[in-house]
Amino acid sequence: MNRYSPWRKPFGCAAGYPGRNSKNLFVRDKKERHWLVSCLSDRKLDLKWLAGELGTKRLTFCSRRRLEGYLGIRAGAVSPFAILNDVTGVVRVALDADLLDREPLNFHPLDNSRTTTISRAGLLRFLEAEGHPPRIIRFPA
């Protein structure tokens, strides 16, 4: 398979697939609180606004070491499914309300060369079962 095969989308998660495509971030604050944030793929993020919504002052992107240590994945493969690897239970999950308003939802399955889909109910059930109930955030327009 060459790198431009339709089964390996080179320009982001699920480009051209029906449903909601996602952008996923792994961020932290100075108090060592960590969040996995999933939002619409075309969402422009203001980290200062997001920090306020999450109840902290400032967010920074986590290092590769933290990404591998807490979520057991490589850079570019962040998705809500990575919560499986949060064995210490320190990562909090935040989901974009607009991401959840249409189905299916598209995410990387811990490997950024692939895409999988899941229903809204399936994603919420998975996160609850893993002990990571998500916080639903309404991003500004």
Image (spheres, rainbow, N blue to C red):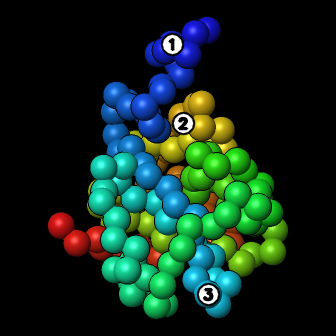
* Secondary-structure class at tag 1: loop
User: Which kind of residue does numbered mark 3 sit on?
Assistant: Lys
Name the residue that disc number 1 marks.
5
Res. 129 in view = no
Residue placed most toward the observer, 103 or 14: 14
CA–CA distance in space, label 2 to label 1? 16 Å
Name the residue that disc number 3 marks.
30
The mark nearer the N terminus, 2 or 1, is: 1
Q: Residue at x 50, y 56 (%)?
A: 24
User: Which kind of residue does numbered mark 2 sit on?
Assistant: Thr
On the image, the x and y values in percent for residue 39 come to: 40, 59
Image height of 87 relative to 56, above or below: above
Left or right of residue 60, residue 50 in this image: left
The mark nearer the N terminus, 3 or 1, is: 1
User: Which kind of residue does numbered mark 1 sit on?
Assistant: Ser
Q: Residue 115, located in which quarter of the rendered image? A: top right
Residue placed most toward the observer, 138 or 102: 138
